[in-house]
Image: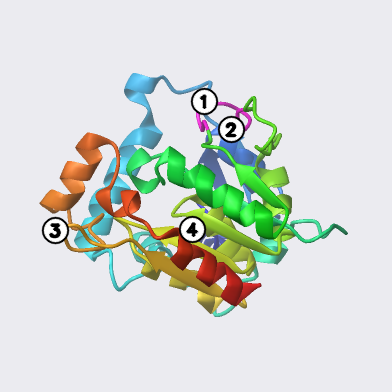
Amino acid sequence: MISSLPAIASLSKTDNVTVMARKYYSGMFRDVAFLQAAGQDEMLKPRFDKSYWLAEWSSREEIRLGYMPKSRMEQFAEMIKTELPEHFDYVEYLAPRKIESEPYLVFCGSAVEKFRSLPEAKERELYERLSARMETVWLPRVNIYRDKIQPFNSEHHFVAGNLKELTNLIYNAKAVVSVDSGPLNLACALGVPAVGIFGVTGPETMEQYARYSDLKFIGVQGEPVKCKLPCYRNYDNGFQQCESRGSARCMDGMSIPKILEAVNQLC
């Protein structure tokens, strides 16, 4: 969603653009001046969900165009035949609010796809190590099928009312430490120092934002376990096995000291 903004902005120079988005995305689009946002949850039934087919088509196009070395923004621009702008200010378009606060970290150890997440014990250990260093806001695994980010009954977890609040939280953080998930994409787009934790995916995908933001980014890659990393888009046996078992071996063996060392380099 965030990667597509430069291409959509380019289209909007000559055409009126309306984005059909689920409610949990429309909150982000609503504050972007050149777009109209419309929720589609109520009008589409799951069995005939056109967004599902669009996502399937997009995935096939990614394979056809090649996942690397093209960025997703470049792929999107090629699909819709438009030129990317030379400069794109994510801060301007996402319009986060600067607030006065004590320094804090934002930590996200869980993605929607479990095989991109840290094991629960390792996630908790990393949070405790980070919070001993600086006040740390721990983002829970997000339930994206609700209008709002789902509340968690934990004193440690941050509860955002919507994506706009999440954007403000990340924008004002000292740094973000996250697995390959939405919070990491937001941090990199907004130019917030970030440590990305990667297993089956690779840190190269975050480099697309370096064209537009003053990005301080360090990627920490898991150790391969009889497989070739990153494997997410190669659909090799390593990826398929990790997907079926629900967790990735490279994430199971992720080095917490290596992540903490990267955090120390940033702040």
238 in relation to 121, above or below: below
Classify mark 1: residues with Cα within 10 Å, few (<14), some (14-19) or many (20+).
Answer: some
Residue 34 placement: quadrant: bottom right
Name the one closer to the observer, 102 or 168: 102
Asked whether disc 1 touches disc 2, contact meaning CB atoms under 8 Å apart, the reply is yes
Q: Amino acid at mark 2?
A: Lys
User: Mark 2 = which residue?
Assistant: 23
User: Mark 3 = which residue?
Assistant: 226
Q: How many marks?
A: 4
Tell me, yes or no, if residue 105 can be seen here: yes
User: Mark 1 = which residue?
Assistant: 41
Where residue 131 appears, as percent x and y from the top left, is: 66, 52
SS at mark 4 in the image: loop
Which comes sooner in the sequence, label 1 or label 2? 2
- Prevailing secondary structure class for the magenta stretch in the rendered image: loop
Which comes sooner in the sequence, label 4 or label 1? 4
Name the one closer to the observer, 227 or 182: 227
Where residue 142 appears, as percent x and y from the top left, is: 53, 35
Magenta residue check for 208: no
Which residue is at a point 40% across and 36% down the rendered structure image? 51
In the shown orientation, is residue 111 left or right of residue 66?
Answer: right
The residues colored magenta run 143-150
Classify mark 3: residues with Cα within 10 Å, few (<14), some (14-19) or many (20+).
Answer: few
